[in-house]
C-alpha cells in the first residue's frame, strides 16, 4: 500500500533521514521506533507532504507522492495524527471534527460526513460530551482522542500517527494504544511512529527500528520485542520488570 | 444543535440592534459634522472588517492594506472623474482591479508568514503609495485629485449628510452579513484553523495558500469599496490618505477592537476615528494621548476592547451571583 524506497530527508545542510526503505501492506499495523532525532517524524512529514526536501521514492497504492501537496495526499487517502496533537484549540470539538472532514465536504458528501460523525463519536463518547467545548480546554488524553477522531473524519485508508503517547499518563497511553488496535481490527491500515517502543511493538504486526536516520533493524513485532539489541537500546531490559509493574 | 441555533439567533438579534441603532442615529442626528464623523466611522469599519478577516481570523498580518483602499479611491476617481464613466461602473472596475492586484501580490507574498508577510505587504503598500504620488499625469500627484463626481442613483443624490450616512452604513451592514456568512461556513472554520496552526490545517487537507489568497482578495475588495465610498464622499483625494500610517491605523483598529471579532472591527474603527476628533482641542498633545490610550488598552485588555468588555461583564455577573 505504502512503499518507501531509499528516502532521504534534509533540512538545509542537515540530513535527517539517510536512505530508508520500508513498506506497509494493506491492513497492517506497522510501528517505527527509535529515539529522539532518529528521523521518525521527518519520515512521516515527507509521507504527508509537509516536508518537501526529500529524495528517493514514496508511493501510495502504486502512485508516486512526489510533488503532491498535503491536501491532495489527504484526498488520496492518507491522514495524519500530528506530533503533539495539534488540534485547533480555539475551535470547538465539533468544529475540529468538521475540519477533519474538510476534504469530504468538497465532495458534497454531507450524509456520509454525518455518518462519520456518529462513528467517531460512538468510538470516543467523551467527545460527544465535550462537543461544544473549545478543544484547547480538553485534557491531554482527550486532545489525543480528538486528534485521532479528526484524522478519521477524512476516511483514511492509511492512518499515520506521530508519537500519540507523547506527554500522556501511562493509563491514557494504554487507552490510546487500545484504540489504535481497535482501528486496525476494523481494517484501517496504520503506520505508527513511537518512542514508547514496547507499547508500539506490542500492538504492531511488523516493526522498523530507526537510528540516526538509518534503518538498523526490521522484522515482525514479536521478533523485535525479544531482540537483544532492541531490548538493550529501547526497552530498557534491566528496568523491564519495574516498568511492566508500573505501566500496565 | 440547540447551541448552534441559539448562536444563530443571537447573531440575528445583534444585527437587528445594530440596524436599529444605525437608523436611529441617522434619523436623530441633524448636525452635519456628526453625520460626517459617523460616515467616516462606517468607511473605516469596512476597512477594519476586511483586515479583521485576514488578520484576526486567518492570522495573516498585512501592513499595506491602505494600498487597496487607495486603489479603490483612485480607480473610481480616475474612471469617473477623468473618463466620465458612471461611478457604479467605476466601482466594479475598482473592486475588480483591487482583487486582481491582491491576487498578483498575494500569490508570492502569502507564502511568507509572520514578520516576513508584514514586511512584504509593507513594501507593497509603499510602492502603491509612491505610484499615487509620482504618476501625476493620471493621479494628480502629491497635490491630489480634484473633480470626483457625486454619486447618483436615479432620483437619489448622495451628497454628504444623511443620504451618504445611510449609503455607507447600508454597505457596512451588508459587509457584516457577508463576513458572518463566511465565518459560519467551512471556509471560516478553515481560516481559524490556519491561524491556530498552518501545518495542522494542511494535515487535514486545507489548501492553506489558496485560502489565504482568497481571504486576502476578499479583504482587498472590502478595502476598495471603502476607498470608493471615501472618494465620492470627500470628492478630493491625495496620496497621504492611503499612506503607511493609514495602514498602521487599520491594524490598530483591528487589534484595539479585538482580533477575530466582527463587532471589534466596528468598535476599533469607531474609537480610532473619534479619538483624533475629540483630541482636536489640544492638538499638540494628541499623539501623546493617542499613544497612551493604545498602551493602556494593550496592557489591560490585550485581547482588545470587545473581549475586555465581555470579560468585565462576565466577571461582574459572576460577582452578583
Image (cartoon, rainbow, N blue to C red):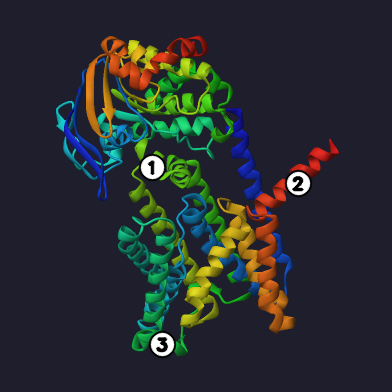
Choose between A207 and B282: the one closer to the eye.
Answer: A207
Q: CA distance from mark 1 to mark 2?
A: 36 Å
Q: Dot 3 corresponds to which residue? A: B141
Between disc 3 and disc 1, the foreground one is 1
Toward which corner of the image does residue A47 lie, by quadrant? top left
Q: Position of residue A134 (x, y in %)?
A: 57, 34
Report the residue at 84% width, 35% height from top: B321
Q: Which residue is mark 2?
A: B313
Residue B115, given in percent of the width and then of the height, sits at 44, 60
How far, Cα to Cα, is label 3 from label 1?
A: 44 Å
Please, which chain is the residue tagged with disc 2 on?
B
Q: Which structural element holds mark 3? A: helix
Say which of B86 and B290 sits in front: B290
Q: Which residue is mark 1?
A: B199
Asked if residue B106 is positioned above or below residue A124 in the image, the reply reads below
Q: Left or right? Give the position of B136 relative to B257.
A: left
**Of marks 3 and 2, the one in the foreground:** 2
**Quarter of the image with the N terminus of chain A in it:** top left
In this rendering, would A118 be left or right of A192? right
Question: Upstream in the sequence, badge 3 or badge 1?
Answer: 3
| Residues at discs 3 and 2 both on one chain | yes
Q: Is residue A48 left or right of residue B199?
A: left
Query: Mark 1, residues whose alpha carbon is within 10 Å: few (<14), some, or many (≥20)?
Result: some
User: Visible in this render: residue B232?
Assistant: yes
Disc on the earlier residue, 3 or 2: 3
C-alpha gap between disc 3 and disc 2: 49 Å
Residue depicted at 46% across the width and 30% down the height? A97
Q: Residue furthest front?
A: A238
- Lower sequence index among marks 1 and 2: 1
Amino acid at each position: 500500500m505504502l512503499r518507501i524506497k531509499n528516502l532521504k530527508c534534509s533540512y538545509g545542510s542537515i540530513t535527517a533521514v539517510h536512505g530508508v526503505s520500508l513498506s506497509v501492506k494493506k491492513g497492517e499495523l506497522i510501528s517505527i521506533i527509535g529515539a529522539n532525532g532518529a528521523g521518525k517524524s521527518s519520515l512521516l512529514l515527507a509521507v504527508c507532504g509537509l516536508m518537501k526536501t526529500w529524495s528517493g521514492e514514496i508511493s501510495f497504492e502504486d502512485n508516486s507522492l512526489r510533488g503532491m501537496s498535503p491536501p491532495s495526499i489527504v484526498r488520496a487517502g492518507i491522514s495524519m495524527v500530528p506530533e503533539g496533537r495539534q488540534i485547533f484549540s480555539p475551535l470547538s470539538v465539533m468544529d475540529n471534527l468538521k475540519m477533519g472532514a474538510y476534504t469530504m465536504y468538497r465532495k458534497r458528501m454531507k450524509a456520509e460526513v454525518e455518518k462519520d460523525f456518529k462513528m467517531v463519536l460512538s468510538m470516543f463518547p467523551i467527545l460527544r460530551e465535550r462537543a461544544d467545548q473549545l478543544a484547547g480546554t480538553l485534557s491531554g488524553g482527550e486532545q489525543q482522542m480528538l486528534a485521532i477522531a479528526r484524522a478519521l473524519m477524512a476516511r483514511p485508508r492509511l492512518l499515520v500517527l506521530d508519537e500519540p503517547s507523547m506527554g500522556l499518563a501511562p493509563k491514557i497511553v494504554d487507552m490510546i494504544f487500545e484504540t489504535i488496535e481497535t482501528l486496525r481490527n476494523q481494517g484501517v491500515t496504520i503506520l505508527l511512529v513511537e518512542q514508547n517502543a514496547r507499547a508500539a511493538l506490542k500492538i504492531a504486526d511488523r516493526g522498523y527500528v530507526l537510528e540516526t536516520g538509518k534503518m538498523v533493524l526490521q522484522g515482525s513485532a514479536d521478533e523485535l520485542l525479544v531482540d537483544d539489541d532492541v531490548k538493550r537500546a529501547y526497552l530498557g531490559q534491566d528496568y523491564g520488570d519495574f516498568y511492566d509493574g508500573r505501566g500496565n | 444543535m440547540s447551541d448552534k441555533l441559539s448562536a444563530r439567533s443571537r447573531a440575528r438579534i445583534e444585527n437587528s440592534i445594530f440596524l436599529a441603532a444605525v437608523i436611529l442615529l441617522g434619523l436623530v442626528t441633524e448636525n452635519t459634522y456628526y453625520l460626517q464623523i459617523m460616515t467616516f466611522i462606517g468607511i473605516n469599519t469596512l476597512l477594519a472588517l476586511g483586515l479583521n478577516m485576514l488578520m484576526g481570523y486567518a492570522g495573516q498580518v498585512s501592513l499595506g492594506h491602505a494600498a487597496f483602499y487607495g486603489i479603490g479611491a483612485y480607480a473610481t476617481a480616475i474612471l469617473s472623474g477623468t473618463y466620465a464613466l458612471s461611478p457604479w461602473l467605476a466601482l466594479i472596475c475598482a473592486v475588480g482591479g483591487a482583487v486582481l492586484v491582491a491576487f498578483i501580490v498575494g500569490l508570492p507574498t502569502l507564502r511568507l508568514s509572520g514578520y516576513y508577510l508584514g514586511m512584504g505587504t509593507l513594501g507593497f503598500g509603499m510602492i502603491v503609495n509612491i505610484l499615487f504620488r509620482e504618476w501625476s499625469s493620471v493621479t494628480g500627484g502629491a497635490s491630489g485629485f480634484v473633480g470626483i463626481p457625486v454619486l447618483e442613483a436615479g432620483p437619489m443624490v448622495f451628497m454628504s449628510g444623511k443620504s451618504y450616512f445611510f449609503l455607507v452604513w447600508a454597505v457596512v451592514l451588508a459587509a457584516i452579513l457577508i463576513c458572518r456568512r463566511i465565518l459560519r461556513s467551512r471556509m471560516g472554520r478553515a481560516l481559524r484553523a490556519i491561524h491556530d496552526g498552518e501545518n495542522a490545517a494542511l494535515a487535514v487537507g486545507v489548501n492553506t495558500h489558496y485560502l489565504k489568497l482568497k481571504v486576502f482578495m476578499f479583504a482587498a475588495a472590502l478595502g476598495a469599496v471603502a476607498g470608493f465610498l471615501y472618494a465620492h464622499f470627500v470628492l478630493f483625494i491625495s496620496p497621504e490618505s492611503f499612506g503607511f500610517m493609514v495602514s498602521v491605523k487599520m491594524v490598530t483598529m483591528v487589534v484595539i477592537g479585538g482580533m477575530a471579532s466582527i463587532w471589534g472591527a466596528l468598535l476599533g474603527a469607531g474609537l480610532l476615528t473619534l479619538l483624533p476628533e475629540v483630541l482636536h482641542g489640544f492638538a499638540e498633545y494628541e499623539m501623546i494621548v493617542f499613544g497612551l490610550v493604545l498602551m493602556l488598552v494593550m496592557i489591560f485588555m490585550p485581547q482588545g476592547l470587545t473581549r475586555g468588555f465581555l470579560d468585565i461583564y462576565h466577571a461582574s455577573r459572576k460577582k452578583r451571583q
